[in-house]
Image (spheres, helix red, strand yellow):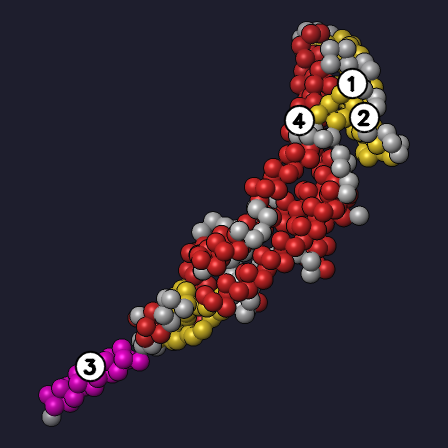
Amino acid sequence: MKKIISVLFCIFSLCYAFSAKKRIPQWITVPSAVYPSETYMNGIGSGETREVAEVEAVKNLAQVFGQTVRAESTASKKMEQAVSDGKVVYSTSGNLHQNITTIIDSENLIGIEIAEYFYNSSEKKWYAIAILHREKTSLIYLDMIQKNDEAVRNALRESEKHPGSFYGYSEICFALEIAEENDRLLKNMQVIDFDRAESVRHTIISLQNIQALQKKFAETITIFVNIPGDIDNKIKSSFQNSFSKYGFKTSSSKKEKYCLEGSYSSEISQKQKIFYCTYILNLEFFDSSTRESLFAINLKGREGSFSETDARNRTFRVLEKNIETEFSRNFDSYINKQTFD
């Protein structure tokens, strides 16, 4: 009797195991059989909880887009406002649950949704499949790219109305910011629907074209620099280097629209064997046609060394570094406000 019970138990166990195996959905074992690759993209995830499985599924699907996430630099106020007003479109997460979009730090979630999930009791594990419908999602990308391209064209038209000005330059910077997002969206679209992506590529203004326009526009802006007290023009040279990074030119003519003027003074003192160079740099960046002050730069400090010459040289090295950071920070902030206003 015991032998019969043992045999029956073994048979029951085998039947149960076979039945459990049969119950595993085909989308786990052969995803393309349920979601054909010509129509869908998919990602399978598993974990101890359903949430973990869903997150892993989304991650596995999103990674096919590669490193196309948005640049780390923060969006300008103009871009934030444009997105808020619906004039520019950034990536959206589509049909994903809030907990997934909170956990996953990615810009590649457009069109992705969790289609199915399954709990395998024998493994004590959850499975989930994330899918992306190629046709539907490529149309979403198309609409976003075309909308953004119109915003790019509007910004460029506005720039053309204000040649040789920082306002015009700021509009090109805004157009470039939108184009960078469009370029990223286009790369994602290529993964989903290459032919449609290539087709739309020829109808929009490319990132490279706007970069060329920005460079060309910057070359039309010349800035008058005058810093009394800067005997060797070392400070002036530092500003010229900063301006050149934006593509601007400098001039000795007071007739220029934009001017950077002020004063520099320094004083050497000695305490015991140490020489100290105390310096003050006060500058104003303004529009000469309106006398509007764009922003001011005020730098002061003291550098010490065992020789007077080295103390002065240390001062100029510190000033050079501070000018580069201070000017860029102030100018970028000014341009940001220009586009925002």
Magenta segment's dominant SS is: helix
- Label 2 sits on a secondary structure element that is loop
Mark nearest the camera among 2 and 3 is 2
Which of 293 and 157 lies nearest the eye of the viewer?
157
Could you tell me which secondary element the residue under label 4 belongs to? helix
For marks 1 and 3, give the CA distance: 92 Å
SS at mark 3? helix
Residue in the image at 64% along x and 38% along y: 213
Cα distance between the residues tagged 4 and 3? 77 Å
Residues shaded magenta:
3-23
Whole-angstrom CA distance, mark 2 to mark 3, is 90 Å
Visible in this render: residue 303? no
The residue located at (44%, 57%) in the rendering is 194
Q: Given the image, on which type of amino acid does mark 4 rest? A: Ser
Using the image, determine if residue 13 lies above or below residue 268. Answer: below
> Residue at position x 73%, y 43% from top?
159
Q: Which residue is mark 4?
A: 244
Q: Which residue is mark 1?
A: 252
Q: Are marks 4 and 1 in contact (CB under 8 Å)?
A: no
- Provide the secondary structure element on which disc 1 rests: loop
Q: Which mark is residue 38?
A: none
Q: Is residue 8 magenta?
A: yes
Which residue is most to the right?
A: 291
* Residues packed near mark 1 inside 10 Å, few (<14), some (14 to 19) or many (20 plus): few
Depth check, mark 4 against mark 3: the one in front is 4
Residue 129 place in picture, x, y as percent: 41, 69
Q: Amino acid at mark 1?
A: Ser
Quadrant of the snapshot with the N terminus: bottom left
Task: Please state the horizontal and vertical placement of residue 227, each as a whole percent of the image.
Answer: 80, 18
Q: Which residue is mark 2?
A: 256
Look at mark 3 in the image and give the residue it sits on.
14
Point out the tag, 4 or 2, that comes first from the N-terminus: 4
